[in-house]
Image (spheres, coloured by chain):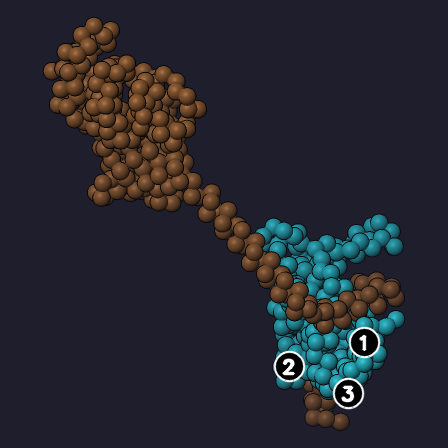
């Protein structure tokens, strides 16, 4: 499947080095997209919380990347750069959702049902998952980002440091507090 | 291996031990299983294509932008003109029987109760008053005795004297000869068609019954349009040129009513006296006597 900018760059009568570079960076970004789309979608769904449209957020992340191809491709870790954008995009989505929810335009997101293991198990599982989501949601944005990127997305400390643009020690401190806070909130949820 | 990698390896196990990761991991495993469904190939490609389109939107040609700008300006101008036209027309509420003429920005009220609400400046002539109204609502009462008005809101400037909302000027007190029940009879028809003023003027300059009738009709028309001074001049001209004419009594009544409209009670009484002396057998004479002090 071709993309217009690539095609126009290649077939344009004013075929220039700049156009060639643009086409080349687009091809590289496409490869990055093919590789990262699914993990980023998953991370966005977890960071933005239930009820978000992960596809829209993924598109938003790549709109940012396509507007600044030189930054993505020159980054030490393009993957970390993309996660950094994803964190900000998810934070924006959470803010928008809180605002819409405050205005009564949107109800709280529902956790998807999963009844493969029978109705009783499904209910228990949905309840447990809802509690984990609630505990995760209750964390501050910074702690949630560190926890999700490290524990769920499997990013390394240096990658998180680059993605969030913070020192590595801060990553570990945040992660430490995030775990303690998360555990505390989980216990609270368990008692309720 | 970089410094950060070393730090990673050194610190991570300690932190993991310090925060009971089993509980955390156990809970997070639930979420790990909660992975969104894999995108279909078509949707995967479509998402990227849309992102490319959003990141590099097609530029609208300059002439289209210009055209849109000009169109918007035109629509704005038309809307402004429409708005001006709508607000330029004053709102007039007239009670049954009220008489008024709106001629451009001049409203002449000759009789009855008329409420005028003006958003743009308008000149109102009502009896003895000539008033400019802007952003105001004024109720006028015009009688044979004269005009009174009430400024409901805004400002009225009658005869160069500014009055603010809430002010009320009642009609002047009735003159001694007020109770007049006389009416000016209609003029007999002439060879001119209805409303052909130039024809009537030409006819009035001649002699005979046609000229007399035309002059009377001109005077009557002026009176009906509230041009009392002009009507009086015509009636006086009629009296001068046709003192013994067929319409002499009517012209005399016209003079009387014009004097009354101009609040000149003495002149009206003098004319009434003359009428009674000159036309004692006229069926209207008893009523005319009522005008005399």
| Label 2 Cα neighbours within 10 Å, binned few <14 / some 14-19 / many ≥20 | some
> What SS does tag 2 mark?
loop
- Which-is-in-front pick, marks 2 and 1? 1
Res B216 seen here: no
> What SS does tag 3 mark?
helix
> Residue A68 location in percent, x, y?
70, 79
> Residue B260 location in percent, x, y?
20, 23
> What SS does tag 1 mark?
helix
For the view shown, which residue lies furthest in the front direction?
Answer: B207
Tell me whether marks 3 and 1 sit on the same chain.
Answer: yes
Please name whichever residue, A136 or A96, is drawn nearer the observer in this view of the structure.
A96
**Position of A15 compared to A105: left or right?**
right
Tell me the colour chain B is drawn in: brown
Quote the CA–CA distance across marks 2 and 1.
36 Å
Q: Which residue is mark 2?
A: A165
Quote the CA–CA distance across marks 3 and 1.
13 Å
Q: Is residue B131 above or below residue B256?
A: below
Quadrant in the rendering for residue B219: top left
Disc nearer the start of the sequence (2/3): 3
Q: Which part of the image, by quadrant, shows the C terminus of chain B? A: top left
Image chain in cyan: A
Residue at the image position 77 percent from the left and 66 percent from the top: B50
Please name whichever residue, B179 or A188, is drawn nearer the observer in this view of the structure.
B179
**Position of B97 compared to A157: left or right?**
left
Tell me whether marks 2 and 1 sit on the same chain.
Answer: yes
Residue at the image position 41 percent from the left and 36 percent from the top: B91
Q: Which residue is mark 1?
A: A8
Q: What label sits on residue A17 in the rendered view?
A: 3
Residue at the image position 22 percent from the left and 40 percent from the top: B159
> Residue A164 location in percent, x, y?
66, 78
């Amino acid at each position: 499947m071709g993309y217009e900018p690539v095609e126009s760059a290649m077939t344009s009568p004013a075929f220039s080095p700049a156009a060639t570079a643009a086409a080349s960076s687009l091809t590289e970004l496409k490869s990055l997209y093919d590789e990262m789309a699914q993990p980023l979608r998953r991370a966005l769904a977890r960071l933005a919380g239930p009820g978000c449209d992960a596809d829209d957020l993924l598109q938003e992340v790549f709109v940012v990347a396509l507007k600044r191809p030189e930054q993505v491709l020159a980054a030490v870790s393009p993957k970390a750069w993309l996660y950094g954008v994803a964190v900000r995009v998810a934070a924006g989505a959470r803010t928008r959702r809180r605002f819409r929810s405050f205005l009564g335009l949107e109800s709280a997101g529902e956790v998807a049902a999963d009844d493969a293991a029978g109705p009783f198990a499904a209910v228990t599982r949905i309840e447990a998952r809802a509690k984990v989501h609630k505990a995760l949601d209750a964390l501050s944005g910074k702690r949630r980002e560190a926890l999700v990127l490290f524990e769920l997305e499997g990013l390394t400390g240096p990658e998180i440091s680059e993605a969030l643009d913070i020192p590595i020690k801060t990553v570990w401190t945040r992660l430490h507090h995030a775990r303690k806070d998360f555990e505390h909130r989980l216990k609270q949820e368990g008692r309720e | 291996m970089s410094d950060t990698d070393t730090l990673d390896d050194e610190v991570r196990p300690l932190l993991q031990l310090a925060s009971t990761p089993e509980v955390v991991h156990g809970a997070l495993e639930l979420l790990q299983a909660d992975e969104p469904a894999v995108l279909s190939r078509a949707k995967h490609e479509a998402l990227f294509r849309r992102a490319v389109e959003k990141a590099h939107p097609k530029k609208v040609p300059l002439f289209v932008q210009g055209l849109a700008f000009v169109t918007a300006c035109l629509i704005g101008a038309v809307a402004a003109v429409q708005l001006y036209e709508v607000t330029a027309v004053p709102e007039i509420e007239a009670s049954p029987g009220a008489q008024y003429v709106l001629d451009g920005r001049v409203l002449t009220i000759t009789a009855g109760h008329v409420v005028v609400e003006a958003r743009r400046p308008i000149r109102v002539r009502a009896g003895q008053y000539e008033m400019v109204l802007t952003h105001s609502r004024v109720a006028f009462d015009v009688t044979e005795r004269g005009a009174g008005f009430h400024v409901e809101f805004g400002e009225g400037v009658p005869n160069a004297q500014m009055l603010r909302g809430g002010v009320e000027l009642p009609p002047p007190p009735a003159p001694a000869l007020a109770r007049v029940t006389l009416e000016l009879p209609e003029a007999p028809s002439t060879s001119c068609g209805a409303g052909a003023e130039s024809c009537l003027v030409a006819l009035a300059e001649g002699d005979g019954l046609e000229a007399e009738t035309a002059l009377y009709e001109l005077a009557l028309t002026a009176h009906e349009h509230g041009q009392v001074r002009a009507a009086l001049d015509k009636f006086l001209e009629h009296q001068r040129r046709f003192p013994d004419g067929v319409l002499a009594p009517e012209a005399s009544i016209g003079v009387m009513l014009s004097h009354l409209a101009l609040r000149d009670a003495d002149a009206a009484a003098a004319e009434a006296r003359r009428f009674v002396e000159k036309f004692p057998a006229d069926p209207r004479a008893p009523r005319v006597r009522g005008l005399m002090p």
